[in-house]
Amino acid sequence: MLHFRLIIQPESRKRLEKLLKRSEKKGDLRTMKRVMTIIMFSQEITPSKISKILGVSKESIRLWVCAYLLKGIEGLKAKKNKGRTAKLTKSQRRELAKIIMEGPAKVGFPGGCWRSPMIQKLIYERFGVFYSVHYISQLLINMGFSYQKARFISDHLDTEKRKEWLEKSWPEIIKLAKEKEAYILFGDEASFPQWGLSHILGLKKGNSLW
């Protein structure tokens, strides 16, 4: 079964990668698996390993390779499914919401904030439903969640003193620096997150910030 080496020319490989990206954007899992099968087979990965990685049968792999040999990239495009598009049931959405509110660390993801690719992976692995990563934000909105920018405030600081410093001390420092045409340098940046402040997002449902 498939005892030969498949060599893909650079131009054909570019077309395969382009189809793979387009299929991922659309959430077309069937075409994605077909394209990945051809790419992996051309890298001399055995059908047995491809079967385990993609969760498909060896017979499907044989058919897809034959389709590619006979029809090229057109042979990999999945026909439109006349049936209903797979989506999460109400009970699955409730379970997903519970997992999201418990935080990503609870299910083995690093960090304390959810990102769309993480939720996409979670949905596929837990429920077997594949959503485009671009649809995840809309799905979360439909479920009652919203994106929130996290604020970084040291928990050991006195709120009143912090307010006084921001409203009085800091403006005086700025004024003095302008008068002397001086630069303001911070000696301790340990409390500043190194990945930036403006793109860290949390998920909120109701009155809770996650």
Image: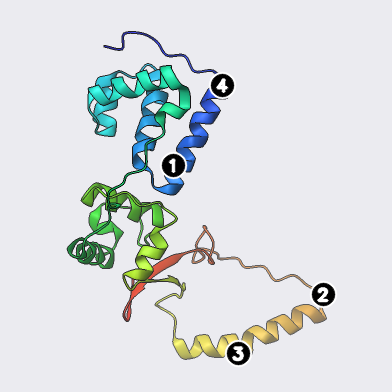
Q: Are the residues flagged by discs 3 and 2 in contact, CB closer than 8 Å?
A: no
In-front residue for pair 64/82: 82
> In the image, what residue type sits under mark 4?
Pro
Foreground tag (4 vs 2): 4
Q: Which mark is residue 10?
A: 4
First of labels 2, 1 by sequence position: 1
Residue reaching furthest to the left: 91
C-beta proximity under 8 Å, tags 1 and 3: no
The residue at 43%/44% (across/down) is 24
Q: Earlier in the sequence, mark 3 or mark 2?
A: 3
User: Does the rendering let one see residue 115?
Assistant: no
**Which of the two labelled residues, at mark 4 and mark 2, occupies the earlier sequence position?**
4
Badge 4 local density, few (<14 within 10 Å), some, or many (20+)?
Answer: few
User: Pointer 2: what residue?
Assistant: 181
In front here: 109 or 181? 109
Residue ID for mark 3: 167
Amino acid type for the residue under numbered disc 2? Glu
Q: Is residue 171 left or right of residue 195?
A: right
Secondary structure, mark 1, is: helix
- List x then y, in percent, for residue 205: 32, 75
